[in-house]
Image (cartoon, rainbow, N blue to C red):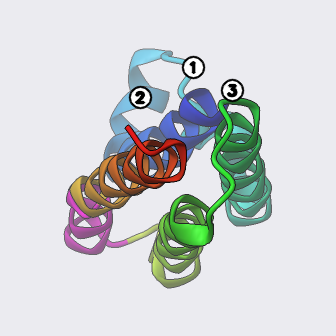
């Protein structure tokens, strides 16, 4: 669920770059569907993504804070993307889209840290 919500955030920001073309071609992008409510909806998806990532970590047994701190950092980055997105500026939106490499890197590092903490706690 977290991955789907994250995808909706970055893909919708990306879709706003060419929403006029989508409308002219009759395409049904999330940018057009969400319209003026894009930012509130994407804030909601950002919270859902972050919560889902944290729940997944809990379900696999991450107990040390490392993973959860990373989830918070990745979620904060998503919130920053949405808050600073100018839905009328293609360059701004492209920068936000590309910054999702950072979200992925944070999540990956968080998973590694969570796994190391489990291994260290088990004495393996």
* Residue ID for mark 3: 1
Rendered image: mark on residue 48: none
Query: For mark 1, what is the residue?
Result: 28
- Please report the residue visible at 42 percent of the width from the left and 52 percent of the height from the top: 120
> What is the quadrant of residue 93 in the picture?
bottom left
Dot in front, 1 or 3 = 3
* Quarter assignment of residue 123: top left
The residue to which callout 2 is attached is 22
Q: Which sits earlier in the primary sequence, circle 3 or circle 2?
A: 3
Counting every numbered tag in the picture gives: 3
- Please state if 31 lies on the left or on the right of 113 as rendered: right
From the top left corner, tell me how far across and down residue 44 is, in percent: 80, 56
Q: Is residue 25 above or below residue 66?
A: above
Q: What is the C-alpha distance between the residues marked 3 and 2?
A: 27 Å
The structure residue drawn at horizontal position 69% and vertical position 26%, both measured from the top left corner, is 1
Give left or right: position of 64 versus 115.
right
Spot occupied by residue 7 in the image (x, y as percentages of width and height): 49, 35
Mark 2 vs 1: CB contact within 8 A = yes
| Magenta region, residue range | 89-99
Residue 52 as seen in the image, left or right of residue 110:
right
């Amino acid at each position: 669920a977290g991955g789907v919500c994250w995808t909706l955030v970055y893909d919708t920001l990306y879709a706003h770059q060419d929403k006029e073309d989508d409308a002219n071609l009759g395409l049904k992008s999330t940018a057009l569907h969400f319209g003026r409510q894009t930012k509130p909806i994407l804030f909601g998806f950002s919270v859902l993504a972050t919560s889902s990532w944290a729940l997944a970590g809990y379900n696999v047994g991450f107990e040390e804070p490392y993973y959860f701190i990373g989830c918070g950092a990745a979620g904060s980055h998503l919130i920053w993307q949405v808050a600073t997105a100018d839905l009328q500026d293609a360059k701004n939106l492209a920068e936000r889209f590309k910054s999702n490499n950072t979200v992925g890197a944070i999540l990956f590092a968080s998973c590694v840290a969570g796994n190391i903490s489990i291994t260290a706690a088990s004495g393996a």
